[in-house]
Amino acid sequence: MSFGYKGNIEQWKWYEAEELDSTNDAIRELNDNDLPAVITAIRQNKGRGRRGRTWIGLDGNLYFTYSLKILPQDLSKYVCLIGLSLAKTVQNFAVEKKVQIKWPNDIFLNDKKLTGILLENIKDDNWAIGIGVNIVNHPILTDQPYQATSLKENRVQTDRITFLHKFLTQFTQDIEIYKKQGFSQLKEQWLQKAYKLGQEIIIKNEQTTKKGLFLTLDDNGYLILKTKQGKEKIIAGDLFE
Ligand code: BTN
């Protein structure tokens, strides 16, 4: 696999590959002194999604992974912050359209999935944040209870690299706010875009399925669900209707 250095975007050294299996794997091949880095792929052949799902690679879409140092106590908040920055970026392109964050951090545009995020640990506090954005193409999903969409389907015209720049700029701004002011203002922004907030939802993970009312996020970014047993803190899972 070969990458070309393309310049810097914010604090990240940007490398691009013509073709690779997964940008989340490629970032592990960089040396420590190449980090922080962002890797894009023009074609990604074996994209991974959360919980063993695949992320289908279609021409013209954005596939990237960037590295970030995240302390253990910040991790759950960063999971939300990355989703929030992505939602804001999408909203700036799709002004007046419905942009929502499905907990923990899928972005939905007009009720269809537009982006996915996969966080994986590289080593110690270094994390790989892999993001797929449907810019001009979207797959037909047959195994999920929702459809996918693209920016193009919503009459938003942009290209993958313009989107990448805007996202990394937005994320840099949001992280500065987080470092200076803490999570509370950003949490409110997240809640304003939350999918199914205040409604009945189902959360599934490997062990359990829980049904209840989506009350809020707590100060760590965990979902608070009101079930028959009382209020429960949900750390991981997928949200269903
Ligand atoms: C999901 O919604 O399940 C997460 C999808 C994450 C896909 C991106 S595409 C770039 C990066 N490389 C991968 O193999 N996966 C992520």
Image (tube, rainbow, N blue to C red):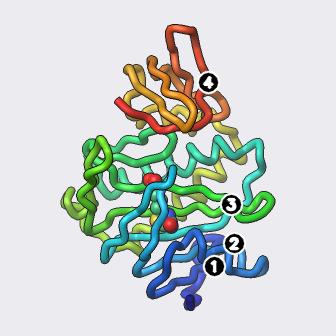
Circle 2 — which element? loop
Q: Nearer the viewer, residue 12 or 174?
A: 12
Q: What amino acid type should be assigned to the residue bearing mark 1? A: Lys
**Mark linked to residue 127:** 3
Q: Is residue 190 left or right of residue 182?
A: left
Residue 89: x, y in percent?
42, 56
Q: Amino acid at mark 2?
A: Pro
* For marks 4 and 2 on the same chain, the one whose residue lies earlier in the sequence: 2
Numbered disc 3: secondary structure: strand
User: Is residue 167 something one can see in this rendering?
Assistant: no
Residue occupying image coordinates x 65% and y 66%: 67
Residue neighbourhood size for the residue with mark 1, other residues' Cα within 10 Å, grouped as few (<14), some (14–19), many (≥20):
some
Q: Which residue is mark 2?
A: 36
The picture places residue 117, in percent across and down from the top left corner, at 50, 55
The kind of secondary structure element at disc 1 is: strand
Please tell me in which quadrant of the rendered image residue 70 appears.
bottom right
Q: Is residue 90 left or right of residue 79?
A: left
Alpha-carbon span between mark 3 and mark 1? 15 Å
Residue pictured at 68% horizontal, 62% vertical = 68
- Measure the alpha-carbon separation of dots 2 and 1: 6 Å
For marks 1 and 4, the one nearer the N-term is 1
Residue 11 visible in the shown view: yes
- Dot 4 or dot 3: first in sequence order is 3
Residue at the (32%, 46%) spot, across then down = 144
Task: First in sequence, mark 3 or 2: give its number.
Answer: 2
Query: Which residue position is annotated with label 4?
Result: 233
